[in-house]
Image: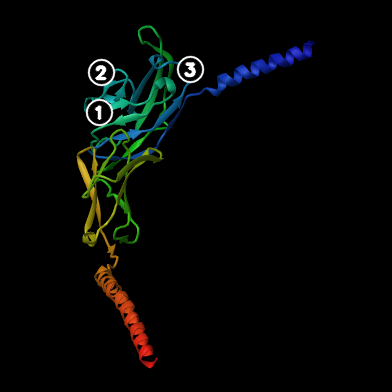
Amino acid sequence: MDKETKFMITCLLFAAIFSSVSSAEWKATVVKSIDALVTSCVVVPCSFSHTGGNLPTSRLRAMWHDKGKTPDTKGNNIFHSDATLIKDNFKGRTQMLGELGQNNCTLEITEIRNHDNGPFCFRVELVKSEGNEPTKDMFSFVEDCVELNMITEPAEPTLIQPMAATQGEPYTVICSVMHTCPTHVPTLTWNWKTEGIIVYHRLIHSGNWETQSILTFIPEETDDNRELTCTAAFNEKKTSSSKLTLSVKHIENYNHIIIPAVVGIGTALLFGIPCIFMAKKYKNRIAELQNQEGF
């Protein structure tokens, strides 16, 4: 291998090493704003990267603090790995849902109060394995903070239905509601039978989720103009509902005409056919007698 080739390989190795080091940076992806229903809960999606390489959760210390306030101080943290440094009015109401070792900084806040609006910023510190002492590697993502939009009353569920129901045929109605707390999803209930109900949960975008309840039933004639109600309960504290009035298309019943007609036809056949045979028999007999007299 000549010197030029060795030099090129060495340069490529240095470039690869430099690229892998420089690609690691302090960066966070946090939703900028999210709705939060007072008395309910909210989950703030968050992910981050750091310059320390692949570290276990035990080597990372997390906190969420008020923007513009000094982190790592009791009066400024809504969450901290050290529970003694959490603000009193947030104690017991916040927790990290993801693993820091997997670069997940998702935050849950429960029992939302109307002053929990923020903005709040995430901070991570790399710590030594001995004694949980911080290193010089730490970062507050003050350019990527979240602000909570306080919602005092829950949104009403949305009802989706076909134009009209038909008596005796399967009919489906969908009730859906948006929310921002997948750890405590809203409960959807109907003023109807509990069987034939399917529930789905799905992520729409940026921390916004949808819960769907699909009701399938067979309407009867007595269900026409009946009121159907779907109620959403948020964290078992606040509720909202939507309703619709069923319009059931009747299927005409012609049995009162068909059955007597069938009975009449059956009776006519029952007595008519023997009569025909008997009349034919007597006609043939009379013809025979007439022939004998003429003979």
Q: Looking at the picture, does residue 281 appear above or below residue 223?
A: below
Find disc 1 in the rendering and name its residue: 93
Q: Nearer the viewer, mark 2 or mark 3?
A: 3
Picture quarter with the N terminus: top right
- Given contact means CB atoms under 8 Å apart, are the residues at marks 2 and 3 in contact? no
Dot placed on the residue nearer the N-terminal end, 2 or 3: 3
Residue 84 is marked as 2
Picture quarter with the C terminus: bottom left
In front here: 159 or 133? 159
Secondary element type, mark 1:
loop
Residue 150 is marked as none
Marks 3/1: CA–CA distance: 29 Å
Amino acid beneath label 1: Arg
Find disc 3 in the rendering and name its residue: 54
| Quadrant housing residue 143 | top left
In front here: 20 or 262? 262
Q: Nearer the viewer, mark 1 or mark 2?
A: 1
Instruction: Measuring from the top left, give residue 290's x and y in whole percent.
Output: 36, 90
Q: Residue at x 32, y 75 (%)?
A: 273
Instruction: Measuring from the top left, give residue 174's x and y in whole percent.
Output: 32, 50
Marks 2/3: CA–CA distance: 28 Å
Dot placed on the residue nearer the N-terminal end, 1 or 2: 2
Is residue 118 shown to the viewer in this render? no
Is residue 219 shown to the viewer in this render? yes
Dot placed on the residue nearer the N-terminal end, 3 or 1: 3
Amino acid beneath label 2: Thr
Q: Looking at the picture, does residue 147 appear above or below residue 135?
A: below
Q: Looking at the picture, does residue 20 appear above or below residue 115?
A: above
